[in-house]
Amino acid sequence: MWIEAQLRQWERISEGVVDLARSPARPGSGVIRVQVYSKRDCHLCDEVKGTLLRVRREIPFHLDEVDIEAAPELWETYKERIPLIFVNGRLAFKFRVDEAALRRRLARERLVGRMRDRLGRFLPGSGPG
């Protein structure tokens, strides 16, 4: 599953992950997860984080920052591509975040999550094993 793969990746680079704002959210808890790949002294990164925090006041989601300077592999992969914003593990925005587009994306993710919760018992692999 993609969540397990993402969690393994987070564990490998855990020294580079900083929680931007404390949240009780956990993977699989139904809370939307947003990650921003960024680095120090990046004005675009600061703008994106400001937008994310502003929207988060009205629409709850778990927000993590991945510091690409924390691991050489992250730096090599993302040094010219930040900020990158992932919503529930999928790339959602590059370089800038339009606040209205973010709100629409979060609303869609919330709706999809509710549908999964309601239909989960009917999906393959979700029943008693």
Image (cartoon, helix red, strand yellow):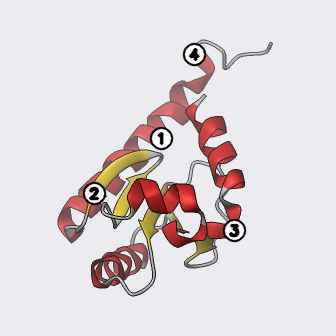
Marks 3 and 2: which is nearer the front? 3
**Rendering coords of residue 17 (x, y %):** 61, 67
* Residue bearing the label numbered 2: 93
Q: Amino acid at mark 2?
A: Phe
Q: Nearer the viewer, residue 16 or 69?
A: 69
C-alpha span from label 4 to label 2: 32 Å
Q: Nearer the viewer, residue 71 or 2?
A: 71
C-alpha span from label 1 to label 4: 14 Å
**Rendering coords of residue 35 (x, y %):** 47, 61
- To which quarter of the image does residue 97 belong? bottom left
**What residue lies at 69% left-to-right and 68% top-to-bottom?**
15
Up/down of 92 relative to 71, above or below: above
Q: Amino acid at mark 1?
A: Arg
**What residue lies at 62% left-to-right and 21% top-to-bottom?**
121
Up/down of 114 relative to 54, above or below: above
Q: Secondary structure at mark 3?
A: helix
Marks 3 and 4: which is nearer the front? 3
Q: Nearer the viewer, residue 49 or 67?
A: 67
Mark closest to the chain's N terminus, 3 or 2:
3
Marks 3 and 1: which is nearer the front? 3
Q: Amino acid at mark 4?
A: Phe
Q: Quadrant of the C terminus?
A: top right
* Residue bearing the label numbered 3: 15
**What residue lies at 64% left-to-right and 49% top-to-bottom?**
27
* Residue bearing the label numbered 4: 122
* Numbered mark located on residue 114 in the image: 1
